[in-house]
Image (cartoon, rainbow, N blue to C red):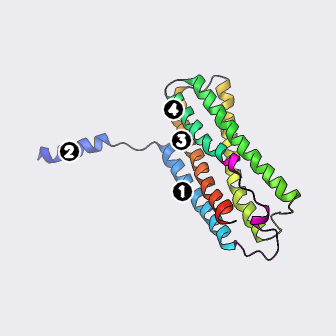
Amino acid sequence: MSAITNPLSETSAAWKLPYRGKVGMACLIFAESAIFTIFVVAYLFYIGKSLSGPSPKEVLTVPVFITICLLSSSITIHLAVRALRNAKTRLFGIWWFLTLALGTIFLAGTGREWHKLIYQDGLTISTNLFGTTYYSLVGLHASHVTVGLIIIAIVMAFTSLGRVTPKYSERLEVFSLYWHFVDVVWVVVFTVVYVVGR
């Protein structure tokens, strides 16, 4: 009888609840994925249905450089969290700053693209269906990048004051999941808008 109950008690003792921060972030990512899915489907549905110009082919250029910057920031944030976990706070600061810089370059590039589209090409959110869906989808992603950069900047400020220590590595790892999510979403947005949509 004891031979039957022992393995069960050992299994239940070995299992522990997952870190609630990761569970919370997983729920947020799931909800945000649903929102992005709606916007992506809307963009795909309305491709080529604008009655007036300009069209994506006429005004969009493929943002290769800023895409490389954003995707590279996934590597730098991973290296930053790993450095902090290993108590290398100075190295953490360097990688974290690089993540902030790469994300800022991406957001500035998006802003520059929008400036060109609005003032040179005359494409606004109310110009046609393409303008409406483009600014909605890319704008939704840009807003998520902005939120991420604000958090990264706050952490950077605390890092410069010497207040970020290895005990915060798990929390920053949870945040890094959000940043990886933002990067993965950009791969989808990039493919839909600049590859399929053109």
What residue is at 53 percent from the left and 28 percent from the top? 83
Report if the CB atoms under discs 3 and 4 are less than 8 Å apart: no
Please tell me which of labels 3 and 2 falls first in the chain.
2
Of 168 and 6, nearer the camera is: 168
Q: Name the residue under label 2.
A: 7
Please tell me which of labels 1 and 3 falls first in the chain.
1
Q: Name the residue under label 3.
A: 174
Q: Which amino acid does label 3 sit on?
A: Val
Q: Which amino acid does label 1 sit on?
A: Phe
- Whether residue 155 is visible to the viewer of this picture, yes or no, is no
Please tell me which of labels 3 and 4 falls first in the chain.
4
Mark seen at residue 30: 1
Mark 2 Cα within 10 Å, few/some/many (few <14, many 20+)?
few
- Quadrant for the C terminus in the image: bottom right
Q: Mark 4 points at which residue?
A: 82
User: Is label 2 or label 4 in front?
Assistant: 4
Q: Main secondary structure of the magenta part?
A: loop
Q: What residue type is labelled 2?
A: Pro
C-alpha distance separating marks 2 and 4: 35 Å
Does residue 65 belong to the magenta stretch? yes
Please tell me which of labels 2 and 4 falls first in the chain.
2
C-alpha distance separating marks 1 and 3: 14 Å
Give the extent of the magenta segment.
Answer: 47-67
Of 65 and 71, nearer the camera is: 65
Q: Which amino acid does label 4 sit on?
A: Arg
Mark 4 Cα within 10 Å, few/some/many (few <14, many 20+)?
some
User: Is label 3 or label 4 in front?
Assistant: 4
